[in-house]
Amino acid sequence: MQNNGLPVDRSRSLLHRANQAFFFVGGFGVASWAPLVPLLKARLGVAEDVLGLLLLCIGVGSLVTMPFAGVLAGHFGCRRVIAVDSLVFAALLVALAMVDNIVLAVPTLLLFGSSMGIIDVTINIHAVRVEQLLKRRVMSGMHALWSVGGFMGAGLFGVWMALGFTPLGATACSAGIIVLLVLAFARFLLAGRSAPEGRALAVPHGIVAFVAAVAGISFLVEGAVMDWSGVFLTEVRAMDMSLAGTGFAVFSAAMLLMRLLGDAIVNRLGARRVVFFGSVIAIAGFLLVIVSSSAWLIFPGFFAIGFGCANIVPIFFSLMGKQQDMTINAAVAAVSTCGYLGVLMGPAAIGFIAHSTSLLASFVLLAVLLFVQLLIGLHVFRKVA
């Protein structure tokens, strides 16, 4: 690693902080987009069904690009891809605050999704390589910074608006923060290119296919809690609408807390034990949510789900640096893509199942999927760790 004349320890610390900064950028950018959705709907004058199709463009853009992101990182180097894509990400945020017709909205949303997918994959590739270089676990802390960025992005947009900025001005301020972070930290990222990939499209195979399944289930559960916990609380448990967001808020707080502590916990207990006990705790959390009608048990149940699930995905991303079936770039791209598929398809699948049976039955299925995930994860550890 080039250290630009800095002492090695100092250079590695800056490398670590730089990778954290771009996880923050990812979460910050996504959260800065969320408040723009109702504004985009109003500007375009479209109904909810058309808006839903427009938002699908983001998912399509991400899914099309993510499998190829590893090749980009290998050819151009993580530093260049992360820096350029972050700047494009910021520019597209501003564009989304300005676009006023569907003809422009569709390609802008597709590009925004593509940019989001590229940064998601490349920062995880970079994090795996940072762990290899530092010879210690940092992945959970990296993922925690994505969550911190999400909280900050949503909060600061509200601050800009409260100060009297227009939506465009508020978005420009948020984009400006991303640009400043790029200017401050991009130079400390790893610049090296990797060996050419065997294929352009990252299709999971070997042990990576099992890890991809773990990621798909993990993100499916997270997406289901995000999209359906409020409906569950208000319709199944008949809670007041004022409590609709509390389940996901408690889940998110637990996940952030455990990711901030995750690297130290994994170092102390070992990755296999954290995955095992985390899965058991998350399943127990779902059981609390399913069988209880009391808020005093339901909300601790959501906390337990976030607590248990928090470090599973970071642990398996770290394992991509130890497996031999695919290159790191291709493996991370494949796992990220399958995880994103879980986020996109999971909530919709839960909706169909809930319509055919009940939302309570859908939550039982989520607990069963976590048990399946645990079995797959233990198989991966037998093969890799």
Image: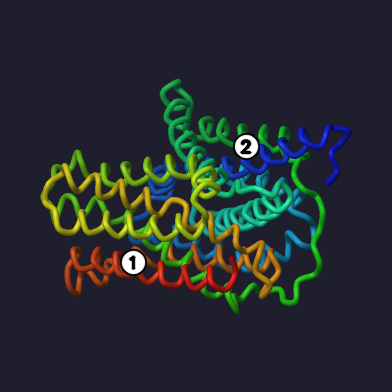
Residue 194 appears in the figure: yes
Label 2 CA crowd tier, 10 Å (few <14, some 14–19, many 20+): many
Give the residue at x 62% y 58%: 121
Q: Is residue 385 left or right of residue 1?
A: left
Going from N to C along the chain, the mark reached first, 1 or 2, is 2
Displayed quadrant of residue 236: bottom left
Give the residue at x 71% y 53%: 132
Give the residue type that dot 1 points to: Ala
Q: How far apart are marks 1 and 2 (CA)?
A: 32 Å
To which residue does mark 2 refer?
178
Image coordinates of residue 238 in percent, x first then y, are 11, 50
Give the residue type that dot 2 points to: Ile
Q: Residue furthest top?
A: 163
Q: Which of 56 and 69 is in front in this view?
A: 69
Image coordinates of residue 337 in percent, x first then y, are 55, 66
Q: Which residue lies furthest to the bottom in this view?
A: 206
Q: Residue furthest right?
A: 5
Badge 1 marks a residue whose secondary structure is: helix
Q: Which of 281 and 158 is in front in this view?
A: 281
Q: Which quarter of the rendered picture does the C terminus lie within?
A: bottom right
| Number of numbered discs | 2
Residue 65 appears in the figure: no
Q: Which of 381 and 185 is in front in this view?
A: 381
In the depicted structure, whether residue 125 falls above or below residue 186: below
Give the residue at x 72% y 76%: 199
In the depicted structure, whether residue 199 falls above or below residue 83: below
Image coordinates of residue 188 in percent, x first then y, are 76, 39
To which residue does mark 1 refer?
348
Displayed quadrant of residue 335: bottom right
